[in-house]
Amino acid sequence: MQDLIAPFVTLFVTIDPPGLAPLFLALTGGMDRAARKRVALRCTLIGLAVLILFAIAGTMILETFGITIHAFRIAGGLLLFWIAFEMIFEKRQDRHEKSAERVVKSDEIHSLAVFPLAIPLIAGPGAISATILLSDQFVSIIDRGKLIAIIGFIISLTFVVFILAERVDRFLGITGRMVLTRLLGVILAALAVQFVADGIFALIGAHAS
């Protein structure tokens, strides 16, 4: 059990299900309960599939395309910054929250579930890099199965957190959602800048050495 605690804590902190809950709430503004549940299920399943893929063959995939995890971190940060920009200046609200009872098209649900929820928020550069690093410690088939089980458990917790986050929306109201969206947009922008900065410094350090 002690050998499993460290990877569990590492992935849990990296994915950060409680921290993703308010972002999920802000990004799915204007959706009804059924639509939010579909988005939550789809994004967590996609995030799970991506992390399992990198747990099994992450190093091979990056090496095949000649991509470093640092470059992946920079790309993810830039994409996150664009989402943060939309949240701060209501661009996303204009598209996703025309009315509280509007019907959400299936392709819109699929698009939001894939980006930015599944990638890069759930299966982001941090989670992918942590998964790749942990896979080096879980070499055998049995050990790799344990790592996948840990990932599955954390993703299940993420889904539960997303479902519970929907109830919080009732207490926020329109003003509360506006304040929360802008606040989270600023936080997400800072997180995006941190991703980019870490990737740039890591690339510089790699080339210097």
Image: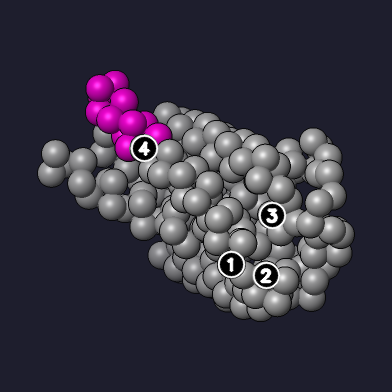
Along the line of sight, the residue nearer the viewer: 195 or 145: 145
Looking at the rendered image, the quarter that the C terminus falls into is bottom left
Judged from the image, the secondary structure of the residue bearing numbered disc 1 is: helix
Q: Quadrant of residue 181?
A: bottom right
Residue, disc 2? 173
Judged from the image, the secondary structure of the residue bearing numbered disc 3 is: loop
Where residue 153 is drawn, which disc sits there?
A: 4
Residue type at numbered disc 1: Phe
> Please, is residue 60 above or below residue 191 in the view?
above
Where residue 28 is drawn, which disc sits there?
A: 3
Residue, disc 1? 171
> Please, is residue 86 above or below residue 34 in the view?
below
In contact (CB < 8 Å): disc 4 and disc 1: no
Residue type at numbered disc 4: Phe
In contact (CB < 8 Å): disc 2 and disc 1: yes
Judged from the image, the secondary structure of the residue bearing numbered disc 4 is: helix
Along the line of sight, the residue nearer the viewer: 98 or 23: 98
* Gap in angstroms between the C-alphas marked 4 and 1: 29 Å
Residue type at numbered disc 2: Gly
Give the residues drawn in magenta, as a range: 139-152
Q: Residues within 10 Å of mark 4 (few under 14, many from 20)?
A: some
At a point 55% along the width and 70% down the height, the residue shown is 191
Query: Which tag, 4 or 3, sits closer to the chain's start?
Result: 3
* Gap in angstroms between the C-alphas marked 1 and 3: 16 Å
